[in-house]
Every structure is written in structure tokens, then in C-alpha cells.
Amino acid sequence: MKIYGLTGGIASGKSTALRVFQELGVEILDTDQLARDVIAPGTEGAVALEEAIGADYFVDGALDRKALRDALYTDAELKQTVESVIHPRVAQAVSEWRETETDAPYRILCSPLLLETSNHASLDAVIVLDVPTDIQVTRAARRDDQSVEQIQAIIAAQMNRKDRLAHADFILDNAGTESELTARIHALHRTLLNDD
């Protein structure tokens, strides 16, 4: 069973791409969603996170994601603490997923930090969603209700576009419309079905 990594910077279209792959019968796993799930209210992860970073970032037992996200960009120690709680739990869930049986033709593991964490090394190939930086900024600012400066700071903290593309086995250009991306994913799907 082949597992392909899917990655891209902020607002590169990862969620849209995953939906299209899923519609094609591919089994997907989104580590962004996993990271939310492992610290969902009432979970052991949420308790561990609150113990690690304090109750200031929690409201009625639920994590105040915006407050934490804003703090993470300026506090490296806090970022390290949060990651020490979330990353091992996500890694465990990914490991369990990889061991399960599936009838899908192949699997896709989506992670914005796929290359930064070297998780791509154990996968069959890397698919990069590529978007010019100016389009990323426009899309992310519109989607996330954040300032251009905040989006630019996020992009600056991520792997740069050139380095990301250097790791790509397959590139999905998402500078255009959603229908254009869908067509490119359908073409890539046909290629991956024959990828021996």
C-alpha cells in the first residue's frame, strides 16, 4: 500500500485537495485535523496541554485557539511546549493509521510540516501544492480574517517555496481556480494508480 505525502504552505489548498482525493476513493489522513482532535475538549491531550501551558489559554475547558495561535508566533518556548504535547500524540495516531487495513488504491498523509519534520522520508513520494506567495497572502487573509502582516509572518516561518519544491516528486499548481486544481488532481490520480 503506497502512502504519498501531501504538503504546501498556508492557503495552498490542502483541504480542497484532500476532499478531491477522498472523492476519488483515496484514503486520507490530515495531521492538522489530528492535531485538533488530540487536544479536543475532554481528551487526555487537552488535560495534558492545560497542565503544560496553564489555564489562561482555555475557556470553559476548551482551548482558545486564536489566543494560543497569536502567542505562538512570538513565544518560541511556548511553541516548543505545545508541540511536546501535540506531536507525540499525532505521531502515535499516524502510526496506528498506517497499520490499519484499507481497500483504497493508495493513501495520502497530509501535513503542513511534512518536510520540516522529515516525515516524508518514510513515504513513497511527496506531492507539493504550489501557490505563488502573493496569492497565498490574499487567500489566507480572506479566509482567516488575519492581517497581511500576520499572514506574511506565518509564511516566513514556514519552509520557503523554493526549498519545498526541491523536495517534490509531484507538483500540483494551485494558482488558478478550484476546478483547475480538481482537474490536475484527477490527472495525478491516474498517474499514481500506475505508479509502480
Image (tube, grey):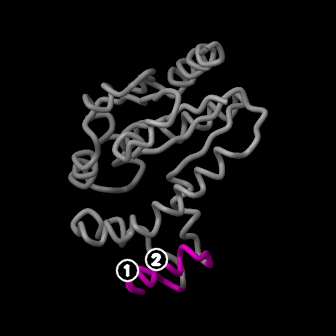
Q: What percent of the width, then of the height, locates residue 137?
A: 29, 42
Under circle 1, the secondary element is helix
The quadrant in which residue 50 appears is bottom left
Q: So how many labels did they put on this image?
A: 2
Q: Which residues are magenta?
A: 42-60
Magenta stretch: residue 49 in it?
A: yes
Labels 2 & 1 near each other (Cβ < 8 A):
yes
Marks 2 and 1, how far apart in space?
6 Å
Q: Tell me the residue that label 1 is attached to.
A: 53
Q: Is residue 83 magenta?
A: no
- Where the C terminus falls, by quadrant? top right
Q: Position of residue 132 (x, y in %)?
A: 29, 29
Q: Amino acid at mark 2?
A: Leu
Compared with residue 66, is residue 10 higher up or lower down, i.e. above or below? above
**Secondary element at image label 2:** helix
Drawn side of residue 47 relative to residue 1, left or right: left
- Between 139 and 118, which is closer to the camera in this rendering? 118
Q: Residues within 10 Å of mark 1 (few under 14, many from 20)?
A: some
Task: Give residue 79's position: percent from left, percent from top.
Answer: 31, 66
Q: Residue at x 54, y 73 (%)?
A: 45
Up/down of 155 relative to 19, above or below: below
Q: Say the numbered circle drawn on residue 80.
A: none
Residue name at image x 48 percent, y 83 percent: 59
- Main SS of the magenta part reads helix
Residue 48 x, y percent position in the rendering = 49, 79
Characterize the local packing of mark 2: few (<14), some (14-19) or many (20 or more) Cα atoms within 10 angstroms.
many
Q: Please say if 73 is above or below 193.
A: below
What quarter of the picture does the N terminus occupy?
top right
Q: Which residue is mark 2?
A: 49
